[in-house]
Amino acid sequence: GSPTQSLHHVSFDLYETLAVELGCESYRKLPVLSVSPGYGKVKKVKKKGGSSMEDVVPKWLDGNVGRMSVMGYGDDTAQITPFEFVHKMIEGSRKGGKEGEGIQVVLGSCTGVESQANSNGRRRVTGVTYTPREGGGGEEEE
C-alpha cells in the first residue's frame, strides 16, 4: 500500500462517524472509479474473481477512455458534499460551548504563519497573519 493508506482508512471511518453525528444528508457510500482520457472505447472490465464490473461503470461513460480502475466498490468509498460538511462542522463546534467559543471563520489571504518550538523540538503554530478579504485595505491582522 501507499505511505498514506492507513490515513485513508482512518479518515474514511471518521467521515462516516462525523456525517452521522452532524446530520449530513449528502453522505453516501458509492463505488468510485479512476478514469483517464484515452483513445479507445470502454471495454468489458473484469474485477478480481473474474466477474464483470458493469454494475460499477456508469452507462454514460461510453466515450474514449485510457486507463480505468476501481478505487472502491462502495464498502470502502463514499462521498459527501464539502459545502455541507464544512458548515455542519462549524455549527457543531459552536454547540454546547460558551458564547464566542468554537470556530471563527475569517475570509482573507494568509500572509504568514508564526510558530514556536515546543519541549520536544517540534514546532507548533501559534498565530496566523492575514489580509482580510472584505474592507481590509491591505492592513494585516493577527
Image: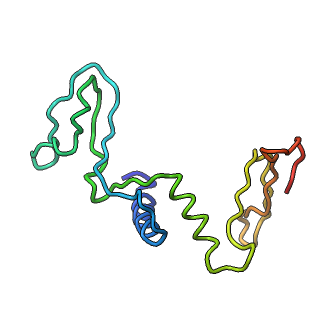
Identify the residue at image location x=56%, y=64%.
89
Vertically, is 135 above or below 98? above
- Residue positioned most to the left: 50
Report the number of numbered marks: 0
Residue 47 falls in which quadrant of the image? top left
Looking at the picture, how far across and down is residue 84, in whole percent?
51, 56
Residue 128 falls in which quadrant of the image? bottom right
Vertically, is 127 above or below 22? above
Looking at the picture, how far across and down is residue 21, in whole percent?
46, 72
- Residue positioned most to the top: 39
Q: Quick check: 141 left or right of 36?
A: right
Q: Quadrant of the C terminus?
A: bottom right
Looking at the picture, how far across and down is residue 109, in whole percent?
75, 44
Vertically, is 107 above or below 137? below
Q: Quick check: 80 left or right of 128?
A: left
Viewer-closest of 103 and 95 = 95
**Can the viewer see residue 6?**
no
Residue 96 falls in which quadrant of the image? bottom right
Viewer-closest of 8 and 135 = 135
